[in-house]
Amino acid sequence: MVSQDWTMADLAALLHGQEWQAADQVTYALMLNAAHRQREGSLTANDLALLPCPLLHRMDWLWLNASQGQFGFSVQQRLYQSLDQDFDPASLSPANPHPFCQAVGWLMVTVPRPLAFFKFYDFLNFSLEAPAGHLPALWYWRLTWMESLQTGGFGTGRGGGFADLARLDALMLRMARCSQVA
């Protein structure tokens, strides 16, 4: 879905039809386009930190409106801010993931030893039954093959791997800064 030139109207139509996974993919395509990273197919933390505020505001509004406040970047940002206050980034590990990732339902926890790995993208919950802030998610999932391996994945994105805080922090900080100019 990422190769086509998608528009906000396409995103609005998909969200209106509650086609959550397709809408997530179009959201990501719009972000790639804004960062001029279509060829690379992934966004760096720096790319996320520089996304245009009007683009983020518009996409967020569409997600919020279509999901009755369940999904959107601002939902993620509020959750992140509330859960990040006492988290020590130095303690990040498979046994101690960022609480945001668990709250939005992005993790699968193994037993008997509790290790938190990221779900594979196709295993996310693309319905309104998902936890608040669960979507959009592809902005965090899509990694280069090498980045996926470096985070413990299988070269297929974030799935099966661990968190890196750079991308998460970058977009959440961008949302906080953009909310100041709303």
Image: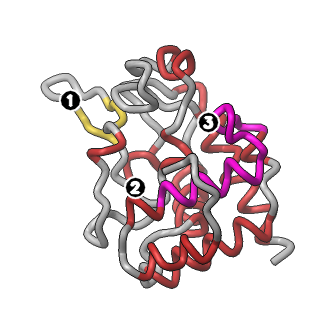
Q: Give the residue displayed 82% in from the left and 49% down from the top.
A: 50
Where does the image place residue 160, in percent across and percent down from the top left? 34, 27
Find the distance from the CA under tag 2 to the CA under tag 3.
24 Å
- Which type of secondary structure does the marked residue at label 3 adopt? loop
* Disc 1: which residue: 110
Q: Which mark is residue 41?
A: 3
* Residue 146 appears left or right of 102: right
- Which comes before the other along the chain, label 1 or label 3? 3
- The figure's colour scheme reads secondary structure
* Residue 153 appears left or right of 108: right
Please give the range of residues in magenta: 24-46
Q: Amino acid at mark 2?
A: Val
Q: Amino acid at mark 3?
A: Gly
- Which comes before the other along the chain, label 1 or label 2? 2
Q: Give the residue displayed 67% in from the left and 31% down from the top.
A: 40
Does residue 45 belong to the magenta stretch? yes
* Disc 2: which residue: 104
Mark 1–mark 2 CB contact (< 8 Å): no
- Which type of secondary structure does the marked residue at label 2 adopt? loop
Answer with the quarter of the image where residue 22 lies: bottom left
